[in-house]
Amino acid sequence: MITVDFGIVPIGTEETDLGDYVSVAVQAIKDSGLSYELTGMGTQIEAENLDELYEAVQAAQEAVFKVGANRVFAVLKIDDRRDKDTRGLKDKVDTVNAMIK
């Protein structure tokens, strides 16, 4: 299972409000069919392989360009763990929460 923390920032926009840009990027992730969770600082994604992950990220970037961004800065933090079959985002949170006293 591959887990990803994904952030996308359009550059050169006229306003500081980026909701219109972020929403089309998240819609592209949603349309990919991948499991994702939107947070206040980015989007977390689960993928089975890098090809489907990169395809979804490419679709998100292209969506932001289509709504008027001239430049897009994206950050990916990828955890590609292959020693366990099902180690998704929820599993990671549950593990840490179980350790907190």
Image (tube, rainbow, N blue to C red):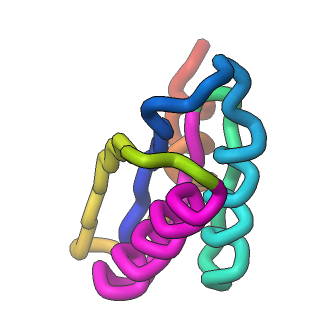
Quadrant location of the C terminus in the rendered image: top right
Give the image location of residue 62, x and y in percent: 49, 68
Give the image location of residue 73, x and y in percent: 35, 41
Placement of 3 over or under 35, stated as above or below: above
> On the picture, is 27 further left or further right than 84?
right
Q: Residue at x 47, y 43 (%)?
A: 8
> On the picture, is 97 further left or further right than 38?
left
> On the picture, is 55 further left or further right than 65?
left
Give the image location of residue 3, x and y in percent: 42, 60
Placement of 67 over or under 19, stated as above or below: below
Q: Which residues are magenta?
A: 42-67
Q: Is residue 55 magenta?
A: yes
> On the picture, is 90 further left or further right than 61?
right
Question: 74 and 52: which one is in front?
Answer: 74
Question: 23 and 39: which one is in front?
Answer: 23
Q: Is residue 45 magenta?
A: yes
Quadrant location of the N terminus in the rendered image: bottom left
Q: Is residue 1 visible?
A: no
Question: 96 and 47: which one is in front?
Answer: 47
Q: Main secondary structure of the magenta part?
A: helix
Q: Residue at x 59, y 65 (%)?
A: 66
Q: Residue at x 68, y 53 (%)?
A: 37
Question: 47 and 62: which one is in front?
Answer: 62
Give the image location of residue 45, x and y in percent: 53, 61
